[in-house]
Image: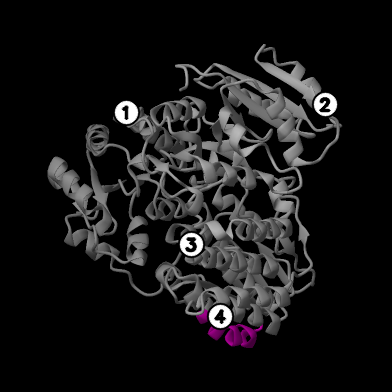
């Protein structure tokens, strides 16, 4: 039985992490659970790691110089020999913990005394407080029991920095296997083989991604270790689990081979995957993809990184390209963001240069109805990558027929890369998906990287033919002269939603200051309940045209409005790219990626809070403080400030 406050030995192997280890130690010092010791095992660092650690004054921290060993299991075993806590945890010297990580795991092991260890959820990141992907879709609750088989079924995330185990377990499983390059998973499997576990789904580990990550350099060794683990425990696993585990391993490794241009090896792995699941169509699809890449000589095109990390091969000829293909496949808001920058490009080029646009069918309505593109090509297949890939295959001959001189890839995924490399244009540029810059700024930089001059925002959109915007508005109560103020409570999750009653209070404040204003709510059926609430509270003061417009009609109607108050949504992007004064309300959303740009927009976000930019659908504190702290009065004054700055 654990005492009320058992001592935890935290083991931190490190090698040349002087630039990051301070942040990691700081995340340990901030733990709400305080009965711990930190043992840092230095693997022969050649930088000033020791100096950084020496500046941190805390008696709970011990520094052990092991010399250069470079064997993961051996370094951890040295730490285990030095540890004297009741519980043991690990953390890599570049990762971070949530402040309650240890407290919650200790509580879990106390609640489940038969559990030998605990693992948690987490996410990967490149910039602090900006998650890239989560270990689990589920982000709350727990799982208790045997997890040995579920690990092989890919149901459990096995990372040692999320691990907390009872030290007495070492008497049964021993330490780390020093002969295996990926000894971490082997150690956790040994624990799972003999002990029950408590899995906390909450993201409590923040795993940093960077070029030096060991897991990114050992994809072949990782595959070999996976094969070894399955073979080692084959007799202890149900046959169906073994077949499923090998199937996934072969498919994933085949994909890795494709990404490293090893097509022949990839096809062999897909064939091995098929042998384990003969009825699955996945191996045949993957094999077809490999053959397609071979047919079109799918290979990296030599390019260069611009100063802003945009991969590109710029246009170097004295004349202008005859035809350009711009690609942005999804989603509606992201497609909309590209439009003012592509409009500026259109305005800067001679009329003889044709610009085509490739996007998903679900996003083609606005591009088709503005006088910007010579041709809008709609990619079918919905959200299914495989169906999109099949339709792309049928479109490829037409791309060759149109002879594009330049391709601006504003999507940067497998489909857009396939199209770009198939066309093999004279000039091309690729959107940086991982930069912390706003999407609009990254779009601008990608267009500039093509080498046709500087790029900026141009909102002088013209529509094809007559729009119904006037008639739709007047039919629903607009008198044709009142200023229209858009209220857009359209966020997808509660953590991104400003309280509805605040919108009504905001509108009352606005009308007191500007009596000739009418309010407008516009969108899809998704916001119908919110629109009905506002209509009930505001009566004739608000016009609701929810579910009455196409995206292009909504875009045209926005051109009649004077101000937009919006949560994170496609309509918010439609507003700011049109040059409409816009105040965006961000809760859990990453504002650095999605914020509106330009001198007529402003945003309120959560980046100043410790829990800011969390990207979670449910607030861990239950109050969505990142948005509820903004009163209607505060938001109104910000809105008035925006309007005053542009008059």
Q: Position of residue 146 (x, y in %)?
A: 45, 45
Nearest-to-viewer mark from 1 and 2: 2
Q: Earlier in the sequence, mark 4 or mark 3?
A: 3
Q: Which residue is mark 3?
A: 238
Residue 395 inside the magenta-drawn segment: yes
Q: x and y percent of residue 477 in the render? A: 16, 55
SS at circle 2: loop
Evaluate whether residue 603 shows in this view: yes
Q: Is residue 201 visible?
A: no
The label number, if any, that marks residue 631 in the structure image: 1
Q: Sequence order check: which comes first, mark 3 or mark 2?
A: 2
Which residue corresponds to mark 2? 48
The residue at 29%/57% (across/down) is 523
Residue beneath label 4, please?
284
Residue 646: x %, y % from top left:
45, 40
Are the residues at dot 4 and dot 3 in contact (C-beta closer than 8 Å)? no
On whether residue 92 falls in the magenta region, the answer is: no
Q: Nearer the viewer, mark 3 or mark 2?
A: 3
- Residue 26: image x %, image y %? 62, 23
Q: CA distance from mark 1 to mark 4?
A: 56 Å
Quarter of the picture holding the C terminus: top left
N-terminal label among 1 and 4 = 4
């Amino acid at each position: 039985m654990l005492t009320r406050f058992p001592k935890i030995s935290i083991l931190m192997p490190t090698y040349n992490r002087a630039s990051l280890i301070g942040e990691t130690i700081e995340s340990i010092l901030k733990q709400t659970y305080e009965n711990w010791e930190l043992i840092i095992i230095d693997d022969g660092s050649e930088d000033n790691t020791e100096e950084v650690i020496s500046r941190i004054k805390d008696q709970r921290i011990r520094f052990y110089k092991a010399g250069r060993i470079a064997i993961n299991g051996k370094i951890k075993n040295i730490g285990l020999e030095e540890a004297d806590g009741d519980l043991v945890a690990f953390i890599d010297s570049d990762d971070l913990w949530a402040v309650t990580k240890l407290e919650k795991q200790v509580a879990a092991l106390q609640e489940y005394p038969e559990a030998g260890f605990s693992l948690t959820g987490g996410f990967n990141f490149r910039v602090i407080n900006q998650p890239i992907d989560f270990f689990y879709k589920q982000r709350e609750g727990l799982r208790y029991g045997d997890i040995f088989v579920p690990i092989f079924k890919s149901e459990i995330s096995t990372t040692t920095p999320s691990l907390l185990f009872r030290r007495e377990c070492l008497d049964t499983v021993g330490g780390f296997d020093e002969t295996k390059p990926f000894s971490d998973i082997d150690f956790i499997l040994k624990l799972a083989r003999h002990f029950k576990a408590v899995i906390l789904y909450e993201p409590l580990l923040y795993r940093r991604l960077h070029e030096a990550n060991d897991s990114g350099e050992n994809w072949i060794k990782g595959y070999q270790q996976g094969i070894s683990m399955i073979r080692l425990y084959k007799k202890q696993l149900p046959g169906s689990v073994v077949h499923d585990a090998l199937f996934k391993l072969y498919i994933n490794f085949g994909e890795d081979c494709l990404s490293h241009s090893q097509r022949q090896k990839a096809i062999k792995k897909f064939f091995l995957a098929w042998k384990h699941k003969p009825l699955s169509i996945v191996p045949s699809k993957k094999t077809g993809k490999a053959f397609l890449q071979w047919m079109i000589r799918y290979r990296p095109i030599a390019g260069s990184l611009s100063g802003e990390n945009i991969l590109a091969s710029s246009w170097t000829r004295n004349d202008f390209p005859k035809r350009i293909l711009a690609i942005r496949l999804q989603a509606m808001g992201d497609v909309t963001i590209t439009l003012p920058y592509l409009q500026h490009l259109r305005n800067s080029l001679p009329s003889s240069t044709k610009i085509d646009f490739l996007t998903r069918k679900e996003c083609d309505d606005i591009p088709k109805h503005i006088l910007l593109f010579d041709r809008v090509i709609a990619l079918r297949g919905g959200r299914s990558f495989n169906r999109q890939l099949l339709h792309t295959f049928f479109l490829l001959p037409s791309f060759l027929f149109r002879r594009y001189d330049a391709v601006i890839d504003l999507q940067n995924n497998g489909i857009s890369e396939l199209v770009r490399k198939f066309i093999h244009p004279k000039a091309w540029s690729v959107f940086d998906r991982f930069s912390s810059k706003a999407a609009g700024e990254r779009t601008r930089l990608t267009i500039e990287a093509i080498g046709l001059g500087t790029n900026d925002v141009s909102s002088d959109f013209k529509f094809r033919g007559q729009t119904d915007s006037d008639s739709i508005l007047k039919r629903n109560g607009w008198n044709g002269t009142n200023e229209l103020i858009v209220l857009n409570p359209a966020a997808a999750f509660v953590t991104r939603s400003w309280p509805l009653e605040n919108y009504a209070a905001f509108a009352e404040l606005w009308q007191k200051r500007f009596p000739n204003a009418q309010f407008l709510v516009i969108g899809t059926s998704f916001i119908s309940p919110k629109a009905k609430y506002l209509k009930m509270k505001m009566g004739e003061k608000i016009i609701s045209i929810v579910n009455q417009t196409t995206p292009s009609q909504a875009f045209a109607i926005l051109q009649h409005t004077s101000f937009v108050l919006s949560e994170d949504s496609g309509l918010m992007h439609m507003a700011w790219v049109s040059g409409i004064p816009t105040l965006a309300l961000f809760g859990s959303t990453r504002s650095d990626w999605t914020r509106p740009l330009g001198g007529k927009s402003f945003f309120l976000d959560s980046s100043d809070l410790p829990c800011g930019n969390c990207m979670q659908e449910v607030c861990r504190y239950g109050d969505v403080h990142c948005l509820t702290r903004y009163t209607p009065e505060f938001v109104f004054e910000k809105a008035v400030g925006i309007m005053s700055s542009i008059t």
